[in-house]
Image (tube, grey):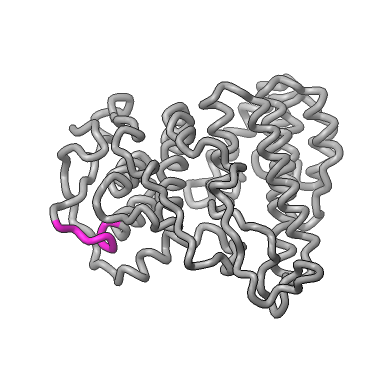
Amino acid sequence: MPDEPLGSGSSEASPAPRSESTARSAFSDLDPLASDGLRPDIETDLSYLLRYDLYHSLSQIDIPPALRSEFITLKPGESLASSLDTLEKLLVEGHFLLAAYLSGAILTSSLLSPTDVKLIFALFYNRLACLELSGNAILAAQESKALEDLSSTFYYAPSDLEGTDPGTGDGKGGSPASYPRHIVPWPLRVLAVRLQSIGFGDSRRGISGLYELGMEARREITRLDIGQDERNGWRERLADLGIRSVNALIEMGDFDTAKRSLSNLRTSAADESHKTRKALLSLVIGDIDAARQILGGSSESGIFPALLSMAEGRYGDAAGEWRAILERGGNKADDAW
């Protein structure tokens, strides 16, 4: 069994490859709110993310032998489109460790150009996310350090200023504003904030990084040249950052600040996802009454009766409630959430 990003391994049959442009679009569109107005004449060299020594060896030693699958390697002469198809198949099937391995193999191969910014960042995001999902967050944290300071000028590129009001700097006709735009996709930036705080051993770095992203989200919300859908998208991102900030405070052990921050978070009545996350964080810090208030009628369904019973020390009731959830059947497992 190989334990190197480009080691020998099995080569499973790949599905019929799509065109390279189609395969690229499946991985390059990480950020639907990214600006399309970046100047095409400016190229960024990301060769530092293509170094072989950046990526850790991966192993399946902690996985029971019966559940192991051999790492998939790039075949000689395999096209980029074919390798991306294989990677997408692994992601769809939930083989996250194998997907992390293959992402590293593609990044360190000769298939990529150092200036292929969108695809490199997308593959790097997949590598880090899959490592975290497969229980290798420490490795992901170490590899995320290669990005270094995401607030540096290196990661900002001038926008295409054509069609911009020289007096106000606001774009006309839907063109972006005149300030420099970040070239790293938003999901990677959010993920890197957490992983780098672990990798550098500085939890406050994560808090400050989230606040910087929050300032950017607020700035985007106030832009005059964007539509309502895009503005709502930035509002959702801002709400997500608020939840992540509270979670970071909890991980730091600052429960008092986390409780105050959580109580100040505004949650839309229609946004069940944020309500659920907010309620779970309330349970983590021991504020059971706040969790009940946030959930309202939802506290009587799903997994929350069991969680609330456990939080209140009624373990016998909790055991019965968990058992009832299991008895609903495999096809209703998602209803528990």
Q: Residue 203 location in percent, x, y? A: 64, 25
Q: Residue at x 24, y 33 (%)?
A: 4
Q: Residue at x 20, y 50 (%)?
A: 74
Q: Residue at x 45, y 51 (%)?
A: 121
Towards the viewer: 272 or 7 = 7
Q: Residue at x 36, y 56 (%)?
A: 88
Image position of 226 (left or right of 191): right
Q: Residue 83 location in percent, x, y? A: 27, 56
Question: What is the span of residues highlighted in magenta in the rendered image?
Answer: 77-83
Towards the viewer: 9 or 288 = 9
Q: Quadrant of residue 194?
A: top right
Q: Total marks drawn?
A: 0
Q: Residue furthest front?
A: 166
Q: Residue 143 location in percent, x, y? A: 43, 33
Image height of 30 relative to 109, above or below: below
Reply yes or no: does residue 203 show up in magenta: no
Q: Residue furthest bottom?
A: 173
Image height of 169 relative to 332, above or below: below
Image height of 304 relative to 126, above or below: above
Where, quadrant-wise, is the N terminus in this rendering? top left
Image position of 232 (left or right of 32): right
Towards the viewer: 272 or 207 = 207
Q: Can residue 305 be seen in this snapshot?
A: no
Q: Residue 285 location in percent, x, y? A: 75, 25
Q: Can residue 151 be seen in this snapshot?
A: yes
